Amino acid sequence: MTVEHEPGPENGAAGAPVSRATAIGYALVAVVLFGWFLYGWLVLRQGFVDSVGESAGTAFGLLLLVSIVATLRQLRDD
């Protein structure tokens, strides 16, 4: 197997730095998701696995939302 080109910013690979506001937003979402997990597990007493699943489902839903918004922004710029 050969590689015809090296991945890099000129070939569409992710290479742009992340802004400070974006990094803070990611950290805030992670803290909220962890809090949601703890709330479900310790306060609602719904079980460890259920709390992990609920937090993971929320995280995947947020990732889907971010993906859709990024796609719409990219289409708007074209």
Image: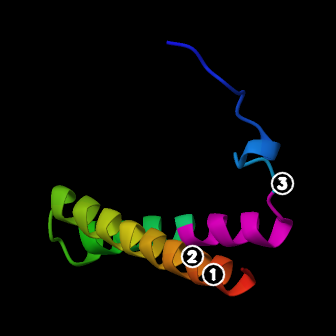
Residue 26 colored in magenta in the image: yes
Q: Which residue is the site of mark 3? A: 17
Amino acid, disc 1: Leu
In percent of the image, x 72 and y 27: which residue is there? 6
The residue sitting at the top extreme is 1
Q: Which residue is the site of mark 2? A: 71
Whether tag 1 and tag 2 are in contact, CB under 8 A, the answer is: yes
**Mark found first going from the N terminus, 3 or 1:** 3
The answer to whether residue 11 is above or below residue 48 is above
Residue 3, x across and y down, in percent? 61, 20
Mark nearer the viewer, 3 or 2: 2
The residues bearing labels 3 and 1 have C-alpha atoms spaced at a distance of 21 Å
Residue 76, x across and y down, in percent? 68, 87
Amino acid, disc 2: Thr
Mark nearer the viewer, 1 or 2: 1
- Near-viewer residue (31 or 53): 53
Mark nearer the viewer, 3 or 1: 1
| SS at badge 2 | helix
Residue 54, x across and y down, in percent? 26, 69
The residue sitting at the bottom extreme is 76
Residue 25 colored in magenta in the image: yes
Q: Which residues are magenta?
A: 18-29
The crowd level at tag 1 (other Cα within 10 Å; few <14, some 14-19, many 20+) is: few
49 on left or right of 58: left
24 on left or right of 60: right
The answer to whether residue 28 is above or below residue 77 is above
The residues bearing labels 3 and 2 have C-alpha atoms spaced at a distance of 19 Å
Q: Which residue is the site of mark 1? A: 75
